[in-house]
Amino acid sequence: MVFEDNSLFWCPFSYMFVAEFDLLINQIFMQQVIKLDILAIVAHPDDAELCSGGTLIKMCRMGKKVGIVDLTKGDLGSRGTPDIRMQEAAAASRIMGLAARENLGYRDGFFRNDEAHQMGVIRMIRRFQPEIVIANSLADRHPDHARAAQLVKESAFYSGLRMIQTEWDGHAQKEWRPKKIFHFIQDQYLEPDFVVDISETFADKERAMRAYGTQFFNPDDTSDQPVTHISSQHFWDFMEARARTMGHKIGVTFGEGFQSESMLKVDDLMDQV
Ligand SMILES: [Zn+2]
């Protein structure tokens, strides 16, 4: 799914959103590459919103092209259905201002870091040619998260090897290696290597999370679905507390922390004050 300008207006000569029209154009002309600045590749729909939503929204507002690839549809989630989660992900994408969102349809809980799964991720990296990849936590409570982080990390490296050949719509893809991989921090606290100030976008991050009505705390929910770890008010409060904790580290109201296994470059020390 490729979005153009948040898909907020209708295409005048057909009853489809501009995003869908753009996707149609891409399909007609078999566009091989849709260049993005930042691509989050994460285990479950809502991982990116929950742990890096403020940052992704901020980058969109700064004019960067941002996309998300979800590895699974969250089939094992106790609440909602895969179809509902896809609708929720599309709504959250529009709120964030994403340029593209795809789902690889891997099996929730049972995807592996093996050749078949790596080749799917490599095809996505080569299709979107991101400068930066955002990935799951390197260690976390949910076993899918660290496994997804390793899968994405290894795929990003192999994507740069031209001897690994892939195709998109029957056409050979060019090799591409993202310059940086940043891992967001999830349920388990990990010390960040840097923190992004999301004070200005925290409210919209919450709006994007509210789009996942079946997943996160919803005071208007009257369904009899089971309360899960992330659907409780406790978890919602925890999410805000985490953002305040990260913000406190850099002297702002709200922040999102990231880890980087490669060294970060500083050009101007004054950027730090
Ligand atoms: Zn997850």
Image (cartoon, rainbow, N blue to C red):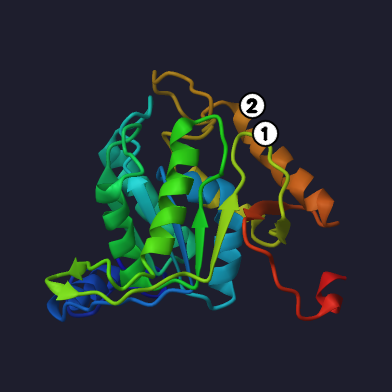
Who's the residue at 44% across and 71% down the image?
A: 130
CA distance separating discs 2 and 1? 5 Å
Give x and y (percent) for residue 253.
79, 53
Q: On screen, 32 above or below 183? A: below
In the visual, does 179 lie left or right of 167?
A: right
- Per the rendering, the mark at residue 237 is 1
Q: Amino acid at mark 1?
A: Asp
Give x and y (percent) for residue 194.
72, 58
Q: Note whether ligand 1 is within 8 Å of mark 2.
A: no
Give x and y (percent) for residue 180.
55, 66
Residue that sits furthest to the front in the current view: 163
Place residue 31 in its image quadrant: bottom left
- Per the rendering, the mark at residue 21 is none
Can the viewer see residue 107?
yes
Say whether marks 2 and 1 touch (CB < 8 Å). yes
- The quadrant in which the N terminus is found is bottom left
Who's the residue at 54% across and 78% down the image?
A: 63
Please give the residue where the numbered disc 2 appears in the rendered image: 234
- The quadrant in which the C terminus is found is bottom right
Who's the residue at 27% across and 55% down the image?
A: 120
In the visual, does 82 lie left or right of 247?
A: left
Can the viewer see residue 199?
no
Who's the residue at 42% across and 58% down the image?
A: 93
Q: Amino acid at mark 2?
A: His
- Element on which disc 1 rests: helix
Give x and y (percent) for residue 196.
70, 60
